[in-house]
Amino acid sequence: MTVILAIGGTDSSGGAGISRDVTAAAQLGVMVRPVVTCVTAQTDQAVEAVHAVPADLIERQIQAALGDAKVRAVKIGMVGAGEVASVIAGVLEACDLPVIFDPVIRASSGGMLSDKMGLSPIVTRAELVTPNLDEAAWLSGEKTEDLNRQARLIRGHGTCAVLVKGGHGTGESSCDVLFQGDRQLSFCGPRLSQSRRGTGCTLATYIACFRALGLSLPAACGRAREMVQDYIATGHEKSRL
């Protein structure tokens, strides 16, 4: 079985975090090895409490999960404090694996979940960073409609590629835009009226799974977006293997 490593927080509502990662990966027949960075008490409406796992225990979890070399890709979500980001980046530096980073800064319900200044070690290590419009502005330091500029500022940290997600925008169409090297590729579709929690987690996990299964980064992004659109529209996930 294809295996990915998923690093992130728990969500007691089951709508996001590690539990979403496991569910999404299962749709593609991929096994998740989970590493927990934070334990949260969440409902669909609010983040009620967050407890950070000590950095040394996170490091040991990652080392154990990577121990037999079966992991083929890494998805990172909620990180928490800067010390944790440095530990994660340090352990992964020795691994030649695609790393997909969904920069979870704020929960859908509004609670702050990560320390902005501490995320740069992971941004530097990642193959792909997948911010929504608010997260792209937060990471780049600029709130602008020039997504190319935002992506360049984020990539200044060293990341190979940025997928800016347009789901929080306006207009009849919703586009996710991949910036990779000198290439810019848009994935567009009708803006859906429905909304679901955990779509950011789900998209990044799908991309990590498709990379683990051997797809190129643009192909992985395209297929993952199609699956997320299905999930938003119907509440059910359909495998696109």
Image: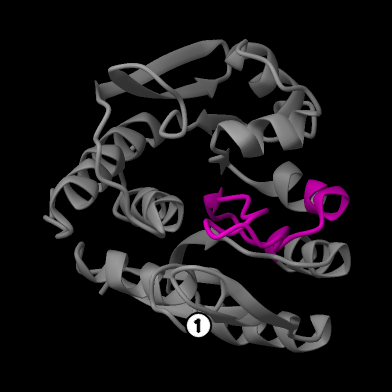
Image point 76% across, 29% down: which residue? 140
Say which element carries label 1.
loop
Q: Label 1 belongs to which residue?
A: 68
| Residue 62 visible in the shown view | no
| Residue 100 visible in the shown view | yes
**In-front residue for pair 36/215:** 36
Direction from residue 126 to residue 54 in the image, left or right: right
Q: Is residue 56 above or below residue 148?
A: below
Direction from residue 109 to residue 153 in the image, left or right: right
Residue type, numbered disc 1: Asp
Give the color scheme: rainbow, by chain, secondary structure or one colour. Answer: one colour
Direction from residue 92 to residue 20 in the image, left or right: left
Please state the horizontal and vertical placement of residue 239, each as a whole percent of the image.
Answer: 13, 55
Please state the horizontal and vertical placement of residue 138, each as a whole percent of the image.
Answer: 74, 36
**In-front residue for pair 128/134:** 134
| Res. 229 image quadrant | top left
Find the magenta span and give its range: 92-120
| Res. 221 image quadrant | top left
Q: Residue furthest front?
A: 45
Please state the horizontal and vertical placement of residue 198, each as a whole percent of the image.
Answer: 41, 59
